[in-house]
Amino acid sequence: MMDSPLWELRTTVARLYAELVRYGLVAWTAGNVSARVPGENLMVIKPSGVSYEDLHADAMIVCDLDGTVVEGALAPSSDTAAHAYVYRAMPEVGGVVHTHSTYATAWAARGEPIPCVLTAQADEFGGEIPVGPFALIGNDDIGKGIVATLSGHRSPAVLMRNHGVFTIGRDARAAVKAAVMCEDVARTVHVARSLGDPVPIAGPDIDSLYHRYQNVYGQPGSP
Ligand SMILES: [Zn+2]
């Protein structure tokens, strides 16, 4: 079992949850990372309410894409339904992350999209970071809001109104990167705005930054 691909994915998700902690994106047990099990109708997600020191590979929960537990002794994260909804609706998504990171959530609390005023934001998000609807936990409303906002949008991050950030990626690592970058952009634009009016970047320049970064930047073959 410990050398199976599923075990490897459990290890990856546990390690990525520690990245959320390392980057200061989560308080207490808030926040979660999940990964789609490639080729299966399954996902790996953390258990609910377990402190991050105890989030090892063997504590991870395997659910089907209806949120039913397949492997694991504990209850899955309370956000499992939202993650599962995204995987069902967006087959290209391999990882989902949720945080209440401070600056991004402050924009969500105001219901205000983050305007694209930084080249790093154009690179990663391809424009503004959008706001999704207010939604209560307990049914598919959060998942629906994420999918409705991000479908056809370049941004891999959505600020769910009055709540926090959900990000998507081709795998869990990409979704974590988007969550880290979203908080970084939210903080810098907040600081810029508190000092005056940030200067917008022209649409064609945003397009060219985005295409270059998505297609050219980095080492060949590496994410
Ligand atoms: Zn939340």
Image (cartoon, rainbow, N blue to C red):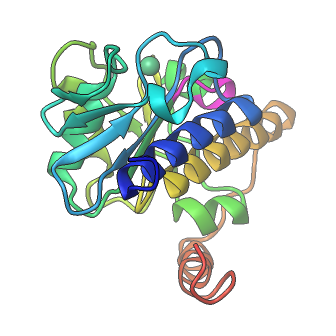
User: Which residue is pictured at 71% across the width and 66% down the height?
Assistant: 119
Q: Can residue 165 be seen in this view?
A: no
Q: Can residue 80 be seen in this view?
A: yes
> Which segment did they paint magenta?
99-104
Q: Quadrant of residue 23?
A: top right
Query: Is 156 on the left-hand or right-hand side of 37?
Result: right
Q: Quadrant of residue 170?
A: bottom left
- Say which of 181 and 16 sits in front: 16
User: Which residue is pictured at 47% across the width and 9% down the height?
Assistant: 49
Q: In which quarter of the image is the C terminus?
A: bottom right
Q: In this view, does 117 lie above or below 215?
A: above
Query: Is 126 on the left-hand or right-hand side of 63?
Result: right
Measuring from the top left, give residue 149's x and y in whole percent.
30, 45
- Say which of 40 and 94 sits in front: 40
Measuring from the top left, give residue 104's x and y in whole percent.
61, 32
- Say which of 5 and 76 sits in front: 5
Question: Which quarter of the rendered image does ligand 1 occupy?
Answer: top left
